[in-house]
Amino acid sequence: MVLLTMIVLAAIIAHTVLTSVDKFRTGNITTTFVSDIPVVTSTHGDVLELARARTVETVSSQDASYLYSIYLGTTSAEIRVPVTYRYHLLLSEPWHLAARGNVCIVEAPMFHASLPPAIQTEQMEKRAESGWARFDKDQVLADLEKHLTTDFSLRASDKDHLNLVREQCRSSVADFVRKWLISRSQWQNKFDAIIVVFPDEHAFASDQELEKYHAAPAIEIPR
């Protein structure tokens, strides 16, 4: 009975020690990482570029015109053009890192569109047609082209475009953290995988909640 009690007590003590170590690692890894950010920003600047996406975008306009009750026709215009969107995060925004066993969980700053997007005007395709009693197709087309930068800047930050590059951004953040981990002797060969979560995906009230977060690794680290 005494032996059994000693075994149980030993297990409790071991669990308490390991839990304390995990909490220390989680707090320490965030503190150490954040303390290195000024060094990184002084060398590379505050912006960490994460992803690029090239898509063919289409904008169009249709304008029906009437004179009193007389239909004068519809003028339509359409432009198709390749656009390159770039995305980044700011290193100076809040980071949180947690350690769960051999997994590093990273709550990274939200990524943002780098504006303005690059419009490949040399590959632009234009089409316009005037209504039967209208002669303004060139003006409608010119107005449409004039607002391309504004239109594509808005598209760059919409849900569809953010999701288009989300996994590429996640992978880039994981690789950035991986390189940092192997540069610090106390974290070398400590982790097998890195999980990255962005603020719009999950909110964490504490480091302990971050530790418990489960998702597919953004990157696995061979040892």
Image: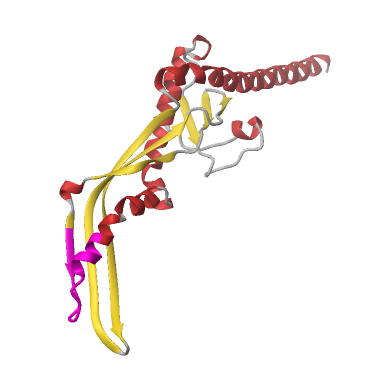
Q: Which residue is nearer to you in this view: 179 or 34?
A: 34
Does 101 appear above or below 118?
above
Q: Which residues are magenta?
A: 126-142
Drawn side of residue 132 relative to residue 206, left or right:
left
Q: Quadrant of residue 141?
A: bottom left
Residue 215 shown in magenta = no
Judging depth in this view, the residue of 175 and 87 nearest the camera is 87
Asked if 143 appears above or below 196 in the picture, the reply is below
Q: Residue at x 25, y 56 (%)?
A: 145
Considering only vertical position in the picture, is 155 above or below 46? Answer: below
Colour convention? secondary structure
Relative to 64, 43 lies left or right: right
x and y, in percent, of residue 106 in the image: 52, 30
Q: Judge left or right: residue 75 versus residue 198.
A: left
For this rendering, which residue is in front, 174 or 141? Answer: 141
Q: Give residue 120's position: percent from left, percent from top.
A: 21, 45
Which residue is located at x 51 percent, y 34 percent? 109
